[in-house]
Amino acid sequence: MSSPLLHPSLSLMKLLVNSNSAFLNPSKNPLINYLLRISIYNHFCAGTNEDEVKRTVRDMKQLGFTGVILGYGREIVVKQDDSNTKTDQSESRRVAYENAVEEWKQGNLRTLKMIGSGDYLSMKFTGAGPAAVEALSRGDPVPPDSIKEAMREICSEIASQGSRLWIDAEQQVFQSTIDKWTLDLMREFNRNGSVVVFNTIQAYLKSSAETVNEHLLLAQQEGWTLGIKLVRGAYIAHDIRDRIHDTKEETDKNYNCIVEKLLTRQFLFPVDNTPDSKFPDVRLFLASHNAESVQKGHLLHRHRILSGDPTIPLQYGQLHGMADEVSCELVAESKRMNASNAKEKEAAPKAFKALCWGTTEECLHFLLRRAVENKGAVERTKHMADALREEAWRRLLRG
Ligand SMILES: Cc1cc2nc3c(=O)[nH]c(=O)nc-3n(C[C@H](O)[C@H](O)[C@H](O)COP(=O)(O)OP(=O)(O)OC[C@H]3O[C@@H](n4cnc5c(N)ncnc54)[C@H](O)[C@@H]3O)c2cc1C
């Protein structure tokens, strides 16, 4: 990431992602596959098959992580036969769309078999292909039947194995409809103390505090558990800028404010005559690489548990291969607190790593996004590089 090779490597990655040439396809060219694996794939991805992924998941848990969040890297591409007549074309389109949904469902069910109780399956609705993208673009209040059925089947499997589901947040044009579809899943599966589905809230959106408040009210009125995965938001470069906070500081403030309100069991905006007992059952997952937000959240949560104040269950997650200093600090703190008294044990942070799996070819889009996102990693992780250098010297000198 720091060498002069960065820019040419990024251009090469873009070429590989967009090319149809067999020579540049990592599944067909072993040299390209090998170079991608040693340079970037092994750093960010969990493995290409069940055995490799299960080994990575086991290693993460042995390191002290509470669990993992696993997603399948494959992005569905629909192929159609152009030579058909008009009616045949619409029929072949319907079949192609349904095949894409079926592939997506099978990919997710296969991924689910690689994780265990307490782990998360992560998925994007747009992963179901054009049927989902078209329904989301139209703002359909319910998904097409094939997607609805697939989601029911996946959620039932998740519930029966004691795992959980993360629905990723995407671009603004889709997001309000994604919220609606996910709320329906929470209504159905987050009942009677069981929590299966988590929705993602993007704190960079000016509307995010209101959205959280609306969801809190719905959960309170209808009696189900609200699962929130809180992120800052990843689509700033492509989305409508006006709807996003004007500065990074405002996004940070909003993110930290939502965390504080939820951990202290308060609505984001005043709600008439709502005593604390009426605050709904909520689970919060902080998906962030920002050390300050993670620390603030942990200190407040810990303080409330140790002083006997009411709060909500809290978990943390970072992407595999990124912000290891944030993740490992949580793991170290968790080990320290778990070795202490019962109250400290209860407040020990629960850290997760988010992993992507698939062949090198299937993960190419995911890898390109990681490479672009880490262009600024040299600056951001300078303190981490300094700490590693210091530790290396300490060990050498001690040796
Ligand atoms: C485990 C995990 C899961 C994720 N899942 C999703 C997901 O489902 N959907 C999604 O959209 N993102 C997702 N993300 C990405 C996330 O939204 C952020 O892009 C990324 O984590 C960087 O934000 P940060 O909280 O780590 O902190 P930082 O690195 O401190 O914050 C960077 C973020 O601040 C915001 N920002 C930067 N500049 C400005 C500005 N000028 N004005 C306003 N805001 C600004 C942007 O959101 C930017 O990404 C996920 C991240 C993680 C770690």
Image (cartoon, helix red, strand yellow):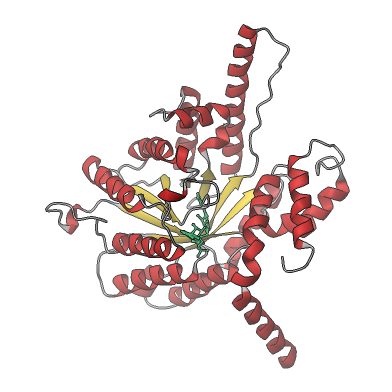
- Compared to residue 226, the image places residue 102 above or below, namely above
User: Which residue is nearer to you in this view: 188 or 275?
Assistant: 275
| Nearer-the-camera pick, 130 or 239 | 239
Instruction: Identify the residue shown where x is 63% and y is 66%.
Output: 377
Please tell me whether residue 291 is drawn above or below residue 284 in the rendered image. Answer: below
Identified at 60% across, 78% down, the residue is 383
Quadrant in which the N terminus is drawn:
bottom right
Query: Could you tell me which residue is drawn at 33 percent across and 38 percent down?
Result: 187
Tell which of 271 and 238 is nearer to you.
238
Q: Position of residue 260 (x, y in %)?
A: 32, 65
Residue 382 appears anywhere in the view: yes
145 versus 53 height, above or below: above
Quarter holding the C terminus is: bottom right
The quadrant holding residue 301 is bottom left
Residue 160, position as x, y percentages in the image: 46, 40
Residue 99: percent from left, percent from top: 61, 24
**Number of numbered discs present?**
0
Residue farthest to the left, as pictured: 273
Could you say where residue 208 lies in the image, as x and y percent from the top left?
36, 51
Q: Is residue 135 left or right of residue 261?
A: right
Q: Residue at x 60, y 53 (%)?
A: 355
In the rendered view, does 74 fall on the left or right side of 141? right
Q: Is residue 399 visible?
A: no
